[in-house]
Amino acid sequence: MSDRASATYPEEETAPDPREDGDHNTTESSENRPENDHEPTKPRTGADAAIASLDAAGVEHVFGVQGGAIMPVYDALYDAGPAHVTMAHEQSAAHAADAYGQVTGEPGVCMATSGPGATNLITGIADADMDSDPFVALTGQAPTEFVGNDAFQEVDTIGVTRPVTKQNYFASDADTVGSTVSEAVELAGAGRPGPTLVDLPKDVTSAETDSQPEPGKLPDYYEVPDEADDDAVTAAAAAIARAERPLVLSGGGVCKGEASAELRAFANAYELPVVTTMPGIGTFPEDHERCLSWAGMHGTGAANMAISHTDCLVAVGTRFDDRLTGGIDSFAPEAQIVHIDIDPAEMSKNVHADYPLVGDAGSVLEQLQTAMPGAFDAARTDPARYETWAEQCVEWTEEYPMTYSAPDDKPLKPQFVVEAMDEATPADTIVTTGVGQHQMWAAQYWTYREPRCWISSHGLGTMGYGLPAAIGAKTATPDREVVCFEGDGSFLMTLQELSVAVRENLDITVVVLNNEAIGMVRQWQDAFFEKRRMASEYGWMPDFATIADAFGAKGFTLDSYDDVADTLTAAREYNGPAVVDAHIDPEENVFPMVASGGDNSGFALTEEQL
Amino acid sequence: MSRNREAGSDRKGLHGPTPEERPRPSGRRSNQGVRVDPDAEASHDPRRTTISALVKHEPGVLAAVAGLVSRRQFNIASLTVGETTNPETARLTLVVEEPEPGVRQVEKQLQKLVPVISVRELGRDSIRRELVLLKVHGDRPAEVQAVAEMHDGTVLDVGPWTITVEVTCEPTKVDDAIDAFRQFGIRELTRTGSTALARGDEWTTDAEEARYERMTDAGEYPGHTNSETTTRPPTHADD
């Protein structure tokens, strides 16, 4: 937010061109732009105002697809504004923007035309909504006078996106379209982040206006909590000081609130064991002894044992999703719950918060840490009492190891491929994934040490998220290595975006963990549907290496343990998008596993235990 | 390479004590996520209550609220909306039937909608009214008139075949009033749903109180001057 707050708002007719910084990669569209330094001769339009607002908010990239009703906005991009990455499909534009927002912490912006362009965005918008990602969509719309008359490519974008946006706006006036876009960008990142959308009728973006960009303003009554109530903090601190088995649960809100340092300081001050949620991966370093990794359906044994036995759960920035809690009746059943979240509506929504602390994660953790010494004095306790519990948690990590067997003479195990890639890549590598078994292995067997390195689709579970997310992540951070794990089924849903990665010359490595099946569904069918594998096994998959080559990327096929190191190295060293089609053991399943709605402490380690 | 690879084994799944071998926690939670204490079993019965929301007077707000109620499966008995003295705001009145945590969720989820300015649950003493129009058969006009008067109603239209009556009363009494007219044969009826204001000098929503104070201080409130003594309604403190 600081960048945006310090952005200057030009009073001149022309908006500043961010490409003059020269510090981000050149995109196709900017290459195609003519070199003209003279003032544009066409009159300033609503579209120009919208683009100037993006500029003023510090937006450097937008992801989108052209189309009829959005043409005036694209025309404005010809002269000014953020660099544009042309995607193959609008859903991918949304995912790329979403990942861009997750990596940078600033709203990712996507654009699409009316009708099918807007409806294709919806999966990506819903994904951003479920994962509370800062995200802005600009959609074209039929001219105002045709709206409501079933015009060509008209859809009620405002109506169909309302349930999956934080707020959406119908731009009705060229003079206010700029301030509407500014507000949409500001709101997307304010408080609990989320997606906003501005619907832009073609006549509004074409109409003349002399309005200038203004700083994004939130409604004056809109409150963003910062510090929690002092008395509530004192009470929560007292509960922690009285507890014998406190556990920190670090969620995605810790990442979004940039509170990883405060969370680490708090946990380390009292040597508390820490588990994370999946979106919280990396907020506490996974190579730390007291990090029990992530809890929930496919979380580690240690994390699920700890969460089931803690008597005080300090939950930060989490909404207690059912994939984390399992059955509510058996979730952390012995714990008083201290719940820190910026969204008051999350308090006692799924799990009763004994100590609700509404506020910014970092601010509240600092308040709590300040209150702890007094709480220990009052309770006549000290943090040494937690030692036995922390030791017990570490013991659980040894008792429930994540080891896997991988005999040389059997098909390749996916866990091995993930670990090999982790060991080969730098510590700040960004991992993106699709959704399914490969996503779980990438989460389990990669060691994440920092936030914003794990970029995935959590709440919505959108297959095909990985490749467009890698495009967004690489565009945001060209200097960092980006690895995308995909499954064969998931990859098939968005692999057309390879054309974008090639065109933009993005140096990303896609590893397809290919078991020729919708593996997670197949795993559930085996466990809960008497092995009736209906529509989950493909039995045949196209040759992804050849597909990659045809797109102009570099394809590799991986079949044996002996080739893993060399093939991954070759793929990483290839300067451009590379795809490794790793043929893995089709019978391999994801464990541990808590059955849907089950008891976290009863996690299965083998299929027989389900 | 690959730290978790286990050399020489060929098995499925992971090592560790089976679910039967593990220590299992003893507590439980209710389906509302409240820890079930042996001493104090926490379960909540649904209760009917009135929630008032001050919202921005702009297109889409009603759809947003209706969508929220439907998506989150909140149980509402009625929803009314109308303008306020401020042309920029409207008031929504919802009658909700939910257990305690659900009522709080309705309030908080409403407050989370960006065009919603201020939300409050009104107390039991709030002023609540619902209007019902009933069209009954017209063959016993005198009796219809009598029943209408018993319920403080008004006969609005008398024709050869039908009589239309308006009854406005406490929402809880509307059903009784309607029942009283059944003897005449109700051809059609329509109800507005409940609308409400806080009682006395209490404000219905915080945002309106803040606006009132801001405007009276600036001498901008219609019908008021900046003079405290002549304009402020008496408060209990003045008595």
Image (cartoon, coloured by chain):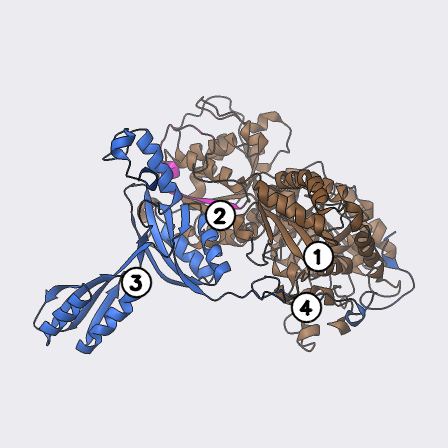
Chain colours: A brown, B blue
Q: Which residues are magenta?
A: A194-215
Residue A87 counted in the magenta span: no
N-terminal-most mark, 2 or 1: 2
Badge 2 element: loop
Q: Are marks 4 and 2 in contact (CB under 8 Å)?
A: no
Residue type, numbered disc 1: Asp
Residue A379 rendering spot, x and y as whole percentages: 71, 47
Q: Are marks 1 and 3 on the same chain?
A: no
Q: Is residue A457 above or below residue A229?
A: below
Give the number of the mark in front: 2 or 1.
1
Q: Nearer the viewer, residue A376 or A316?
A: A376
User: On residue A311, which mark appears?
Assistant: 1
Q: Position of residue B173 (x, y in %)?
A: 28, 66
Report the amino acid beneath label 2. Answer: Lys
Please give the residue where the numbered disc 3 appears in the rendered image. B171
The chain holding disc 2 is: A
The residue at which mark 2 appears reads as: A166
| Residue at 37% across, 27% down | A210
Task: Give the quarter of the image for residue A61.
Answer: top right
**Chain where mark 3 sits:** B
Seen as rendered, the residue at the extreme front is B239
Hey, what amino acid is under mark 4?
Answer: Ala
Q: Secondary structure at mark 1?
A: loop
The chain identifier of the residue carrying mark 4 reads: A
Q: Which residue position holds label 4?
A: A595
SS at circle 3: helix
Residue type indicated by callout 3? Pro
Q: Nearer the viewer, mark 3 or mark 2?
A: 3
